[in-house]
Amino acid sequence: MVGWKSPGDRDLMVLQPVVKCKNSDCPMPSAARIRLPYPNPPKTGATPPAWPPDGWQLRLICRECDHWYIYEKQDIQWAPYSSPLEEYSGLDFQCVELECAEPNCGSRTRWHVLDNSQLSETELLEFVLRADPVVVCENGHPLSISGVASSSVQKASSV
């Protein structure tokens, strides 16, 4: 929990959606959270938005342990921060979209990473493909074995 200096400081903070890494062996401290981008986050004291919608899913790879999990609505918490995620220098929420190269598949899967190391597109793609467990397309084909027909990397302003 964030310690505030005065009640007025609280008014300057925003609520940001966060998830906790699901890997019980993750070296990230148990109180730490992975921030998710959210446009126009509410100020602290406000009621958090009814977000995400039912059925929402996010494939997220933890930078601390390299494990990926699918996160859903019930995994979202809201935490106070001094400024929105997009205002932090050197902290980017990246989306890597991969198209499966398995014959007759062609599914496209999005993988998300909160990157604080300024990885190049090639390094980010390599990071995703070596995540644990092996990343798979929507039809279950392991992308590191079946291959990737195409890929794209972009900064995500929302998920």
Image: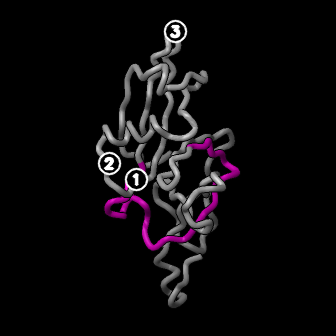
Using the numbered discs, state the Cα–Cα distance from disc 2 to disc 3 in whole angstroms: 32 Å
* Kind of residue indicated by mark 1: Asp
Sequence-first disc among 2 and 3: 3
Residue 131: give x, y in percent of width and height.
50, 40
* Residue ID for mark 2: 119
Secondary structure, mark 3, is loop
Tell me if residue 50 can be seen: no
* Residue ID for mark 1: 115
- Nearer-the-camera pick, 121 or 39: 121
Sequence-first disc among 3 and 1: 3
Residue at horizontal 31%, vertical 53%? 118
Residue 83: give x, y in percent of width and height.
43, 69
Lateral position of residue 53 relative to residue 132, left or right: right
Residue 104 circle label: 3
- Please say whether residue 69 is one of the residues in the magenta stretch: yes
Using the numbered discs, state the Cα–Cα distance from disc 2 to disc 1 in whole angstroms: 7 Å
Label 3 Cα neighbours within 10 Å, binned few <14 / some 14-19 / many ≥20: few
- Please say whether residue 1 is one of the residues in the magenta stretch: no
* Kind of residue indicated by mark 3: Asn
Residue at horizontal 62%, vertical 45%? 71
Residue at horizontal 50%, vertical 69%? 14
Region of the chain picked out in magenta, as a range: 68-93
Residue 11: give x, y in percent of width and height.
50, 79
* Kind of residue indicated by mark 2: Leu
Secondary structure, mark 2, is loop
